[in-house]
Image: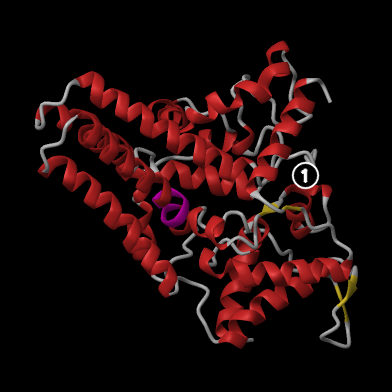
């Protein structure tokens, strides 16, 4: 087995995606022996990197994205503090910084969270602090994303991405309230508050008043509590306090700009993620063992969108190639496009349904259709 194949296979098994003894369900045309769909798919995905003789980690395109995102964020805040800006200019530069934060969250923070940027843990850990730079605790997000999503996709009560706080009904297994009839209308407003919730409520709630059993059982290191408060203080200082204290900007102007940024960040990030699992064609399992193999669970609960649109892929950090992301979370997203072609081809050969929407607009539409269906009691 090639080195890259060994790494991918080992990490895939660690993510509980590829059980060591999958049940036979088909035949690999590349071999003479009968193979299951998960085993053939894993082999082909592994083989891609071996044949191309490339690393599954960050390539030049990824390092360019990292440099670009960080440069735009730094330039926007440098300009805010060094230039004598009037109110419209201040808002414009502040918003540019917010757009850069959105780009960094989707493109750099998410990949580093999965150790997909570098084989050196220190590099991924350092870049993961982009979350804290954007006001979100990186340590807690990592726990929620790995344990509370990747290991339990679309499972009611376990998948953290399905948390609607009683205001949104994301699964047919969740109790319905009268207000859910209108959730496909007010969902955008709540999504716009998504990042504000993380900054001011969610992180503290998960540390001190955890709802999930795995959080209650986790003993968080003392340094993570320190990083939680230090990170929040740093973020609020440079985003809210210093523009008022050092630049003399009015608090309403700064607070309004702060709110505007979070409306953009929250709405964009929520829509990018929610349109990959909660649409009217995806499935909501009743338990972890419903599928014979985790690969079938991924295909049933996950959908791609706009995979042939390089601009969408570039802006969303490849999260539109979401099936590949769940199959290979440790692979840098700049490799997703050719891997998606392998996924499509293999799924077609074995007759496994592959869910996709041609555009992000269609994905949003099907997300709203699901919300309407669930709101009406379906």
Q: How far from the left and from the top, in percent, is residue 338?
A: 63, 72
Q: Is residue 21 visible?
A: no
Q: Nearer the viewer, residue 5 or 188?
A: 188
Say which element carries label 1: loop
Q: How far from the left and from the top, in percent, is residue 364?
A: 66, 39
Tell me: residue 93, above or below residue 8. above
Q: Which residue is mark 1?
A: 282
- Please state the extent of the stretch shown in magenta in the rendering: 104-109
Q: Nearer the viewer, residue 216 or 232?
A: 232
Q: How far from the left and from the top, in percent, is residue 295?
A: 75, 59
Residue shown at the point (9%, 32%) measured from the top left: 246
* Residue 107 inside the magenta-drawn segment: yes
| Left or right of residue 314, residue 132 in this image | left
| Left or right of residue 2, residue 117 in this image | left
Residue shown at the point (37%, 29%) measured from the top left: 260
Tell me: residue 339, above or below residue 152. below
Quarter of the rendering containing residue 367:
top right
| Left or right of residue 6, residue 128 in this image | left
Locate the C terminus by quadrant.
Answer: top right
């Amino acid at each position: 087995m090639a080195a890259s194949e060994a790494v991918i296979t080992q990490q895939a098994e660690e993510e509980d995606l590829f059980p060591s003894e999958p049940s036979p369900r088909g035949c690999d045309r590349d071999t003479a022996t009968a193979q299951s769909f998960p085993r053939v798919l894993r082999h082909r995905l592994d083989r891609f990197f071996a044949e191309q003789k490339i690393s599954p980690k960050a390539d030049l395109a990824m390092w360019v994205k990292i440099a670009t995102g960080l440069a735009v964020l730094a330039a926007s805040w440098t300009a805010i503090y060094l230039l004598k800006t009037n109110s419209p200019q201040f808002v414009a530069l502040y918003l540019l910084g917010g757009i850069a934060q959105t780009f960094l969250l989707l493109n750099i923070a998410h990949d580093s969270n999965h150790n997909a940027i570098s084989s050196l843990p220190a590099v991924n850990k350092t870049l993961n602090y982009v979350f804290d730079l954007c006001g979100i605790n990186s340590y807690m997000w990592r726990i929620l994303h790995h344990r509370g999503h990747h290991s339990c996709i679309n499972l009611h009560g376990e998948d953290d991405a399905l948390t609607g706080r009683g205001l949104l009904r994301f699964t047919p297994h969740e109790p319905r309230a009268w207000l859910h009839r209108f959730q496909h209308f007010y969902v955008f407003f709540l999504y716009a508050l998504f990042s504000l919730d993380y900054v001011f409520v969610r992180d503290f709630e998960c540390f001190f008043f955890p709802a999930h059993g795995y959080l209650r059982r986790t003993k968080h290191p003392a340094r993570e509590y320190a990083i939680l408060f230090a990170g929040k203080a740093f973020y609020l200082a440079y985003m809210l306090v210093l523009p008022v204290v050092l630049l003399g900007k009015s608090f309403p102007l700064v607070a309004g700009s702060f709110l505007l940024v979070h409306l953009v960040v929250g709405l964009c990030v929520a829509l990018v993620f929610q349109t990959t699992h909660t649409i009217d064609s995806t499935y909501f399992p009743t338990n972890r063992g419903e599928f014979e193999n985790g690969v079938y669970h991924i295909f049933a609960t996950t959908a791609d969108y706009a995979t042939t649109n390089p601009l969408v892929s570039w802006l969303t950090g490849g999260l539109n190639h979401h099936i590949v992301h769940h199959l290979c979370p440790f692979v840098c997203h700049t490799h997703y496009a050719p891997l998606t072609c392998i996924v499509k081809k293999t799924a077609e050969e074995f007759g496994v349904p592959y869910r996709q929407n041609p555009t992000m607009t269609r994905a949003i539409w099907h997300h709203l259709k699901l919300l309407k269906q669930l709101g009406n009691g379906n």
